[in-house]
Amino acid sequence: MRIELLKKSVSIVGGEGAEKLVDILYNKKNVNEMVISNKLDFTINQTRNALYRLFDHGMVSFIRKKDKKNGGWYTYFWTLNDRRALEFLRDRLVEEIKQLSNELRDRTEKRFYYSPEDDIEYTEEEALENGFISPETGEVLEIRDNSEIVNEITKRLSDNESIVSAINEELEDIYKKSVAAIARKDRAEKAAKKKARAAKKKTTKKTTKKTTKRAKKKVSGKRITKKKTAKKKSVKKKAKPAKKKTTRKTAKKKTSKKSAKKKR
């Protein structure tokens, strides 16, 4: 159903033969314009003209790449936008439904007259102004039987409303798929970020363990050297004061002997 709707939409904008583009581009991405031209049996200019008309309505998108093998000319690659094509057709049909509804109201509420010879139709106001005489043929105007026209309008309205309903279903399906795709992408990105954070955390733990081990080794080495130097210093300090005391005592003894001799 979607393909038929897309063909209807594309043919309105792209012109005669453009509906074949749907068969070439449907469910594909970035199709080479040369491939499209060959399959359509169009010249490259005819193909581009049709695609540009669709592009103006957002029904297709393209990317271009420079072909270095063929003198650096750009080659275009085209993708069909299903959603925009369906929305264009829906909007067009909705507008047509409004017009048909107004016409149906007029045909059921008002009277119309016509000239049997040339089949020119006049509203009741126009017929009254002309005295119910055709200004073209001079014939007496006859009242139009609107039953066939009403039936035709009613059928067209029903058909268009059915198509609009089908388009809305297709658009709803496209929307759900796009939401699901976005959700999958978000989950994948979150999982990748989580994995990266876990890996970073793991590496930081390893580096911190290594640095703490190195720091502990350095601290323990410093403690050992401090203990050794402390023992050496304590031995030297004990030896020095002992010598000083002995020298002071001997000095006192000498002075005391000298003073005793003088007294004598």
Image (cartoon, rainbow, N blue to C red):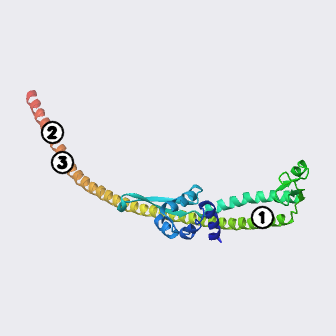
* Pointer 1 local density, CA inside 10 Å: few below 14, some 14–19, many at least 20: many
* Pointer 2 local density, CA inside 10 Å: few below 14, some 14–19, many at least 20: few
Q: Nearer the viewer, mark 3 or mark 2?
A: 3
Residue drawn at 48 percent across, 69 percent down: 38
The amino acid at mark 2 is Lys
- The residue tagged 3 is 236
Residue drawn at 19 percent across, 43 percent down: 241
- Closer to the chain start, of discs 3 and 2, is 3
- Closer to the chain start, of discs 3 and 1, is 1
Q: Could you tell whether 194 is left or right of 141 in the image? A: left
The amino acid at mark 1 is Leu
Q: Position of residue 156 (x, y in %)?
A: 77, 65
- The residue tagged 2 is 249
Q: How many marks?
A: 3
Distance from disc 1 to disc 2, alpha carbons, whole Å, reads 135 Å
- Closer to the chain start, of discs 1 and 2, is 1
Q: Under tag 1, what secondary structure?
A: helix
Query: Which quadrant of the figure contains the N terminus?
Result: bottom right
Q: Position of residue 161 (x, y in %)?
A: 75, 65
Q: Which mark is residue 82?
A: none
The amino acid at mark 3 is Lys
In this view, the residue farthest toward the front is 138
Viewer-nearest residue: 10 or 229: 10
Q: Could you tell whether 171 is left or right of 151 in the image? A: left
Q: Position of residue 91 (x, y in %)?
A: 69, 58
- The answer to which quarter of the image holds residue 54 is bottom right
Q: Nearer the viewer, mark 1 or mark 2?
A: 1
- The residue tagged 1 is 157
Residue drawn at 61 percent across, 60 percent down: 13
